[in-house]
Amino acid sequence: PSLRPLRCLDDFEQAARLRLPRPVFGYLSEAAETKRSLRDNRECFDDFGFVPRVMIDVSKRSMATTLLGHEYAAPFGMAPMGISALYAYRGDLVLARAAARANIPMIMSSSSLIRLEDVASEKLGAWFQAYLPGDAEDITALIERVAKAGFTTLVLTVDTPVTPNAENFARNGFSSPLRPSMRLVWEGVSHPRWLFGTFLRTIARHGVPHFENNYAKRGAPILSSSVTRDFADRGHLNWEHFALLRNLWTGKIIVKGILHEHDARIARDMGADGIIVSNHGGRQLDGAVAPLRVLPEIVKACPDIPVMLDGGIRRGTDVLKALALGAKFVFVGRPFGFALAVGGAQGVTHALNLLAQEVSRNMAMLGITRLEELNADMHLFRNQ
Ligand code: FNR
């Protein structure tokens, strides 16, 4: 299919809606409860207008960004997304390869249906996102497995002490575990490209999809109730578990899902190498503040480590506003999932090229040649 009608990241959502069975599209696009956080993650960017500087030579621009010792081609990367292998065949691998080709970071979700070793062994520079298992022994086993596979950057997601309200997923026919039903069969049959190209192809080559990375064990099939049990059992986790993890893991650790400056300080003081300010794309606590709103305070609290942000980034202008407010880097979730569903590797590459072009073009119109020149006092006006 031609990707040309897809001219910005938002265009991919409608295209993906047609391509995916409703339960799968719903899982990818939906958010918790009233979707306040999902909406505010977008609307918060309207609080700021740009104040461009003019008549500056912007003919040579670079958006290269050094993060954790690596020079990336752009200041954005791919946020971790579970079950990506249901959006396209071997979806996590497709994303990781596209990211490596573009020299941007991709974070592999631990709720993926592909073994973490399969991604690590291709040496694509992907990071690994973990949810901590319940006890010290399992944490140790998980860390050993992730390190042995070859990952060097670990992202610990800390905003999921319990499984979120799944009502909007259920409304679209998605459940965990997945319960086979006539509706599910119909959804498959009425999306033959997905059924043959993604789902049956996966089953034929790799068997029924499993959560391959939940903790240290080979995971449960998506049809098994142990999925819910394994993922739910995290309520007691606390900073002592982080201390254990920091002790075990010799690579970089990024803490994802922080919204309070005090938590940011704790993470930093306990040895986090970076923080992702995030409300999980509005998929956990509905009404959780939009990351952009608390970003400046967190940057002030942790000036010595990279503070990153995700949630609602859809435009080059969003990237630039977040960076002007102090983010070192941003991550984009859903749009890359939609792009994966719509056009596989080409779709993802098209999406990240569009975003990169927007960033570069907007840098010129803002009057900057390097991202370090961005400055909230100079370039942003707070709308009343
Ligand atoms: C997510 N997110 C997520 N985060 C995480 O740490 N581990 C995970 O397994 C997942 N899974 C996941 C699945 C899907 C379908 C989505 C959409 C999101 C959250 C994700 O990393 C990120 O925080 C948000 O998606 C960012 O918001 P946007 O860019 O989607 O608005």
Image: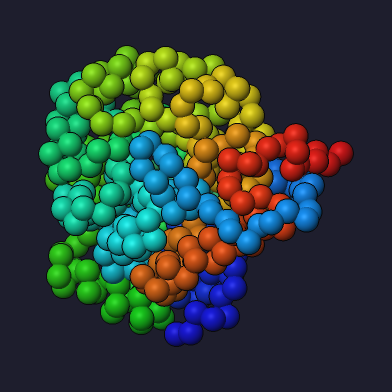
Where 249 sits versus 166, above or below? above
Q: Position of residue 177 (x, y in %)?
A: 31, 51
How was the colour assigned to the protein in this rendering?
Answer: rainbow
Give the quarter of the image for residue 323: top right
Residue at the right extreme, as displayed: 384
Q: What residue appears at the point 39 percent right and 46 percent down from the top-left corner? A: 71
Is residue 29 rendered to the left or right of residue 192?
A: right
Measured from the top left, where is residue 88 in percent x and y? 34, 68
Horizontal and vertical percent position of residue 322: 62, 42
- Against 125, residue 199 (above or below) is below
Side (left or right) of 309 relative to 374: left
Q: Is any part of residue 293 visible from this angle?
A: yes
At a point 26% along the width and 23% down the height, the residue shown is 245
Q: Give the residue at the far front of this rendering.
A: 57
Give the residue displayed 36% in from the left and 51% down from the top.
106
Q: In which quadrant is the N terminus drawn?
A: bottom left
In-image side of 134 versus 185 (left or right): left
Task: Give the number of callouts.
Answer: 0
Relative to 88, residue 58 above or below: above
Is 306 left or right of 301, judged from the image as shown?
Answer: left
Residue 357: quarter of image: bottom right
Q: Can you say which quadrant of the picture contains the C terminus?
A: top right
- Where does the image place residue 208, in percent across and percent down from the top left? 19, 62
Residue 200 versus residue 110: which sits nearer the camera?
110
Q: Residue at x 44, y 51 (%)?
A: 77
Q: Is residue 314 in sight in this rendering?
A: no
